[in-house]
Amino acid sequence: MAQARISAKASEGAQQQPQQQQQSGGQLRGRFYRSTSMADRSSRLLENLDQLELRVEAFRDAASAMEQEKEILLEMIHNIQNSQDMRHISEGEREELNLTANRLMGRTLTVEVSVETIRNAQQQESLLHATKMIDEIVNKLLDDLEDAKMRLMSLYGACTSDVPAGPIDQKFQSVVIGCAIEDQKKIKRRLETLLRNLENSEKSITLLEHQKSSVRQSSNSKQD
């Protein structure tokens, strides 16, 4: 009788062991499948974020392009208003053209585009230093136009990868290198704008001096 019970328990244990192994295998397979599914989800999410990152950068680039376009439009309108051609038309025509120019400038200024640059403390300090160096030259433009132009050209030479036509301000170059990449581009654009305005001013001054000289020569000829 005892032997029969032992045999029955042994048989029962033998039957339960495959069932336990099957259940254990099912649990392992379940965990394995869940891990695979989580990896797939993570991969898909990462791929989506990579695609969004490209769109975000394209969005920022487009906004930066709009910022530059606004600066260019305002500069062009200003140059037309202060051109020599505006000085050599009738007062009525000049007034009408100025009204149109002011209207265009007003409409341009209604467009607000701002792309904030992410900076660390060092980059912020470098930007302030570079801006101060440029402002110091701009504030002395009227004192010595030619000297200011040469100094601005040396600053611009420090911002470009091309071979500069003149000397480079090494101190300014080291400051600009410490700025964020976007700030470096903005500093370079500002210097380009300043140099263009100086060149236009010099042309206006030269043309004005030439006209004065022609008037003097004509007056002297009549006196003779």
Image (cartoon, rainbow, N blue to C red):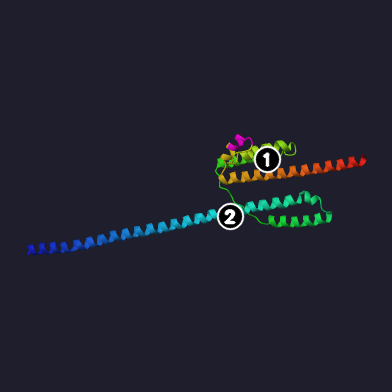
Type of amino acid at the residue the image marks with label 2: Ala
Front position in the image: 62 or 223: 223
Q: Residue at x 35, y 58 (%)?
A: 36
Residue 60 counted in the magenta span:
no
Front position in the image: 97 or 25: 97
- Quadrant of the image for the N terminus? bottom left
Q: Residue at x 72, y 53 (%)?
A: 77
Residue 169 counted in the magenta span:
yes
Q: Residue at x 70, y 51 (%)?
A: 76
Task: Tell me the CA gap for discs 2 and 1.
Answer: 28 Å
Taking the image as shown, residue 14 lies to the left or right of residue 162, namely: left
Front position in the image: 97 or 115: 97
Do residues under tags 2 and 1 come within 8 Å of each other at their CB atoms?
no
Is residue 57 placed above or below 176 in the rendered structure? below
Q: Quadrant of residue 8?
A: bottom left
- Give the class, few, some or many, for how many residues have Cα within 10 Å of label 2's Cα (few <14, many ≥20): few
Is residue 66 placed above or below 128 in the rendered structure? below
Q: Percent x, y for residue 104?
A: 72, 57
Q: Which residue is mark 2?
A: 62
Count every numbered label the image shows and give the total. Answer: 2
Q: Percent x, y for residue 68?
A: 63, 51
The local secondary structure at tag 2 comes to: helix
Q: Which residues are magenta?
A: 166-173
- Quadrant of the image for the C terminus? top right
Q: Which residue is mark 1?
A: 135
Q: Percent x, y for residue 159?
A: 60, 41
Q: Percent x, y for residue 155?
A: 63, 38
